[in-house]
Amino acid sequence: MNGTNVPPASQPWSNKTVVITGGTSGTGFRAAQRFLDRGANVVVNGRSPERGQAALDALREHSSRVALSIADCADHTQASRLVEESAAAFGGIDVLVSAGASGKGDPKPFADMSPDEVRDGVMTRFLARMYPVHAAIPLLRARPGSCVVMLTTDAARHATTGETMIGAYAAGIIQTTKTLARELSRDQVRVNAVAMTLTAGTRSWDRIFATESFEKHLFEKAISRFPFGKAPDADDVANAIVFLASPEAAQITGQTVSVNGGLSFGGW
Ligand SMILES: NC(=O)c1ccc[n+]([C@@H]2O[C@H](COP(=O)([O-])OP(=O)(O)OC[C@H]3O[C@@H](n4cnc5c(N)ncnc54)[C@H](OP(=O)(O)O)[C@@H]3O)[C@@H](O)[C@H]2O)c1
């Protein structure tokens, strides 16, 4: 007997277009590889033309159905251009993965942050994820069954020393995911998020462990506490992104999935 909720296995990604902000590195890049391997059209985005070209060259090893759009997603005009270029390249957008954001400087206690740092984080860590979504809504509405997957961090769920504001911006993503999912449900557009923790195979990881520092020693201690004996890596996070974007997740919306290997940093 066939289960009625089992999606057809044949080519669910052919003719689908996935736009990945921050798709030129780390988790966004790993997600791009997976979508291309499944037959989707993919547009990757980042701010640096050099890093973008290197990523594009590597992704062409997987499929020729890939394009690059250089834009700073913390600028709404550039985020809108990214969306327009993506739609022009492949005729529309079915999935928007909003992963491109990076604040200046390392985590630090709230008391040590300057007022400018507090304000800039809203632009670089929160609005950089929200602006592409805002710009893409008309195109997503035009394709019922389309979806958004946003990246956020577990610092929104568990008090993490040095990440008072990072946690606040991330909590904004989690709440936006719920509210936007409700608003867009009438258009058959799903909205979900993936919350990362300390994740291997990313630029943050490379930077943290490159030199001796207080942060490095702190995170070495944290790694020893992951229940499975190691931190998640970018592939683990990319797998969750692809699942939430897939037809298998057709009844999942408004949710945030933590890919943290079972570790909550709340006890710090
Ligand atoms: N790695 C971790 O442990 C960790 C933990 C929690 C949360 N996060 C967050 O999760 C997201 C993905 O992390 P990751 O470590 O996989 O990333 P990553 O390796 O640092 O790559 C970040 C990607 O985003 C792009 N990007 C950054 N700011 C952008 C902007 N304003 N507009 C467009 N593209 C932008 C980068 O390219 P360009 O530099 O060329 O712009 C790059 O493609 C990031 O937002 C990160 O802050 C990471």
Image (cartoon, rainbow, N blue to C red):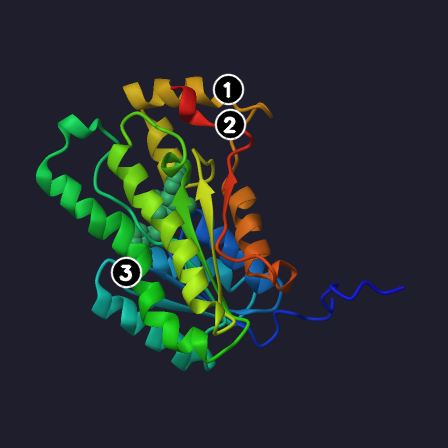
Quarter of the image for residue 43 reads: bottom left
Q: Is residue 62 visible?
A: no
Name which residue type carries label 3. Cys
| Mark 3 within 8 Å of ligand 1, using the beta carbon | yes
In the rendered image, the residue lying farthest to the right is 1
Name which residue type carries label 1. Arg
**Disc 1 on helix, strand or loop?**
loop
Instruction: Measure how far apart labels 2 and 3 are at the Cα level.
Output: 30 Å
Q: Name the residue under label 1.
A: 225
Depicted 255 relative to depicted 228: above or below: below
Do the CB atoms of the residues marked 3 and 1 lie less than 8 Å apart? no
Quarter of the image for residue 153 reads: top left
Depicted 254 relative to depicted 90: above or below: above
Front label number (2 vs 3): 2
Q: Quadrant of the C terminus?
A: top left
Do the CB atoms of the residues marked 2 and 1 lie less than 8 Å apart? yes
In the rendered image, the residue lying farthest to the left is 115
> Which tag, 3 or 1, sits closer to the chain's start?
3
Name which residue type carries label 2. Leu
Give how far across and how far down residue 113 sits, in percent: 14, 32
Using the image, tell me which numbered label, if any, was put on residue 73. 3
Do the CB atoms of the residues marked 2 and 3 lie less than 8 Å apart? no
- Classify residue 92 as left or right of residue 49: right
Depicted 244 relative to depicted 187: above or below: above
